[in-house]
Every structure is written in C-alpha cells, then in structure tokens.
Image (cartoon, helix red, strand yellow):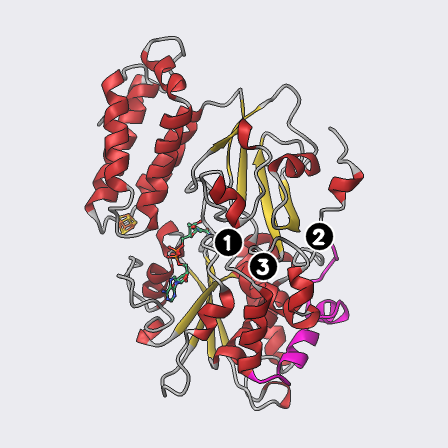
Amino acid sequence: MTQPRPEVLQKLTPVLTKRWLSPDAWQIGVYERLDGYLALRKALDVHPDDLIQLVKDSGLRGRGGAGFPTGLKWGFIPQGDGKPHYLVINADEGEPGTCKDLPLMTYDPHSLIEGAIIASYAIRADRAFIYIRGEAVHAARRLRHAVQEAYAKGYLGKNILGSGFDLDLVVHSGAGAYICGEETALLDSLEGFRGQPRLRPPFPAIAGLYASPTVVNNVGTIASVPYIVLGGADWWKSMGTEKSSGPMIYSLSGRVVNPGQYECGLGITLRELIELAGGMQPGHNLKFWTPGGSSTPLLTAEHIDTPMDFEGVAAAGSILGTTAMQIFSDQDCPVYNTWRWLEFYHHESCGKCTPCREGNYWMVRTYRRILAGHGTVADLDTLQDTADNIFGRSFCGLGDGAATPVVSTLKWFRDDYLGYIEGRTAPRLSEKSLVGA
Ligand code: NAI
Ligand code: SF4
C-alpha cells in the first residue's frame, strides 16, 4: 500500500462524513453533543424564502446523480396554491457501485432528519417521506429509531421547538426494485401502486405525490442542508469548483487497496482518489472505470486526471452521476463486466416500454453467446444497433443506463470482444448459459 502524499491527504474534507467514526452518533444525545439540531434552531428563525435563497446561493446541486440545482428545485414549489406540499427523500440507492447514502443513514441518521425538517420548512411541507431501499433493513431500523427520538425531543410533530411549524416524517421501505429509484416510479410506489415511471413533465415540483407539489431530493442533498445553514453559502462554495460547489462523497470500489467512501471537494481527480485509497492493488494497472455508476459512460486509464466535478467529467465524455467509481484493471474483462451489468438492467427493467424491455432481452442473449465463444463479428454491429435504439428512445433513464456500458466498451475495447470471437480469449460462460439464448 502506498501512503497518500500530504498534499493529497489534505484534500479530504469530512463534512457529511465527519460523524461516521464517532461511536453512537446515530443516537440523538450524541448527535446533539456534536452540534446536532443547532442548524434547525437557526433555520426556524429565518423566513422560508430566505432559506431557499441560501441554498440557491450555496450552489448545492443534487447528489442523486443528475446534479440539478437544489435551490432552484425548491423554488419551483408554488406558494399560496392551497395544496399540500410534500418532501420525498429518495433513499432507494441502487445504482451499481453506489454506496454513500446507506452509510450516511446508518451512522448519522439524524443529519438526514434535521435536513428534512429544514427543507420541509423552506418549501412549506407538513409531511415528509424517506423512501428507503427494501434491502437496507439495518439502515431503515436506525432511521425509524432516530425518527422516534426526534419526535420525543420535539424536533418532529406539532409546533416544532415552539415555532408553530408542524411536520410528520414517515420512513417507507420499498420492496427492492431498482426502478423505484426513478423519482416518478418512487412516487407511484409510495402511493401504493406498482412502481413504474410517469411521463415528465409535469415534474414532481408541480404534480408529484398525490398530484401535489413535491420536492424529491437525494439523501446526500438533504443531509447537506444543515451544514449550509450553519456554515453559510460562502463556506460551502469554498469547497469544490465554481460550478460544482461543496464536498462530495466518492465511493471507490474494485481494484484499489482500500475501497470505501472518501469525501473531498468536487473537482478532485481520479489519480488523487486512488492515492487516497492506498493505490491500485499490487500487480493491477488501471484499465477502465465508471465515474458515477454503471449507467455513466466508462472512462479509461487516459482519463485518470479528469476533475471529478459535473463539468470536468462531462468534458471527458461522461457523467458525474452518483460518484460511484468502480475501478477495473488490466486483469478485468470489459466484455464480461458489461454482460454482468446488463443482466442487472434486464432483470430490473420494468417492462413499460419496448426499447428497454426487448432490447435488453436481446443484448443479454448476444453477450452470453459471445462470452460462451459462439459470437460473430456481426454480433458487434447488432449490439451497437440495439444499444442505439434503446438510448434516447426509452421512457426513462434505465434504458439509457443499460445501453451506456455497451456503447462505451464497443468504443474503447472492441479488441476484447474480438478476442472471444476469434478464439484468442478463453470462453467465460458455459454452454448452459446459452439455454434460451
Ligand atoms: P433529470 O435530469 O431528468 O432530473 C433531475 C431532477 O431535476 C429531478 O428531480 C427532476 O424532477 C428535476 N427537474 C429537471 N428538470 C426540471 C424542470 N424543468 N422543472 C422541474 N424540475 C425539473 O434526472 P433523473 O432522470 O431524475 O435522474 C437521472 C440520474 O439519476 C442519472 O444521472 C443517474 O446518475 C442517477 N441515478 C442514480 C441512482 C442512485 O442509486 N442514486 C440510480 C440510477 C440513476
Ligand atoms: Fe421501464 Fe425500462 Fe422503459 Fe424505464 S426504460 S420505463 S425501466 S421499460
């Protein structure tokens, strides 16, 4: 393992992760001793419109993957419309490789609850929901415990801290469907229907939960809010870059010595992050990587100095996404890994639209054929054509996400495909996997 150089070590900026190593910070007494709920007290003395302006000034952008400006989204909620308003926190973290919300909810659930109360106050919502992924049983238990503690201390319920503001917060567990992380499918699921995406527009800000104005924000976005309230917009902007402000939790997995979460200002490079993670595993050289989960175009070793902010990754031809950086080496096969992702997308496709439902079905079968040593060069054209007909023609982002690693690996690693087709690479799948192919 290589030790990070001091100048790289300095780039760690624990803000949202700062309590993760404090024993029992998930309990309200410990959280309060570590400055917990101070931001709420401050926020309740501020006019809701000024809070929205503060978040706008901070430049906070959504941490769920799309990077939409948070203050702008809050400002879309119509005021004085006589309708109920809702805050829905998307905790259905499911993008392959992504693991930032789950530890946050496990180790520091009150920071999310505090952020939820402040955000609800700002958008004038009196009911908020945390929609958590079904498999995240332990984190859901922690959250429910924390919600009970917050009610008991008067941070939730009627007349919070004597302010006159009321809020009920409900933790709702999904049933383990990736598509329910898509915001409108999530809303359908929360309403008790089968989770399938709705047509947008209207966006949830206008017609969301029960057709009422709804802010849907990611866990990391909402958990950032108390820090912005306490530290101010300028402090927040002092981390990150001009257009991508603040700290970000990067999840590194794969061929690094110390996989895990590293919180740094937006704009740090992959080279520096790998250094923080102890370097590449011995005997492994970087070959390809995902900047923000498997739905984002793959990048290669030549992109190692890409600044990991929204603009820097876009300039390199990809998307920052969820900052789930899966690191693959020269000992990993891009064709095999693309097949594994595709099996996931095929399984998780909700079936609502034809390009995604049928296209993934056929792509999975083509990959199995190639990996079992029965592929042809014509299969590569078919894969490209199928991916092109899924991307941009599917009803929601899942279709685009599925086509993305296919297009990337055909672009960067065609020779790895040809290796299986020409018999230079030993088959990775058995004949059995061709049943039904
Ligand atoms: P999007 O760009 O369509 O929307 C982002 C947010 O901005 C949404 O909340 C949307 O309602 C809002 N918005 C956009 N335009 C608006 C307008 N004109 N008026 C009002 N609100 C507006 O992105 P989308 O499809 O919601 O999310 C895609 C991202 O999700 C991908 O970049 C991917 O990285 C990420 N993702 C994250 C996962 C996770 O586990 N965290 C799983 C899968 C994908
Ligand atoms: Fe469902 Fe896939 Fe179509 Fe999205 S793209 S609506 S997941 S079938």
The span from disc 3 to disc 2 (Cα, nearest Å) is 19 Å
Query: Which stretch is magenta?
Result: 21-47
Name the residue carrying label 3: 105
Q: Residues within 10 Å of mark 1 (few under 14, many from 20)?
A: some
Q: Residues within 10 Å of mark 2 (few under 14, many from 20)?
A: some
Name the front one of labels 1 and 3: 3
Q: Residues within 10 Å of mark 3 (few under 14, many from 20)?
A: many
Name the front one of labels 1 and 2: 2
Q: Residue at x 43, y 29 (%)?
A: 337
Name the residue carrying label 1: 136
On the picture, is 228 further left or further right than 141? right
Ligand 1 is within 8 Å of the C-beta of the residue at disc 2:
no
State if disc 3 and disc 1 touch (CB < 8 Å).
Answer: yes
Q: Residue at x 46, y 74 (%)?
A: 75
State if disc 2 and disc 1 touch (CB < 8 Å).
Answer: no
On the picture, is 182 further left or further right than 273? left
On the picture, is 262 further left or further right than 201? right
Mark 3: which amino acid?
A: Met
Mark 1: which amino acid?
A: Ala
Q: Residue at x 36, y 68 (%)?
A: 204
* Whole-percent x, y for residue 406 in the image: 35, 32
Q: Nearer the viewer, residue 38 or 349?
A: 38
The image shows a total of numbered marks equal to 3
Under circle 1, the secondary element is: loop
Can you say which quadrant of the picture contains the C terminus?
A: top left
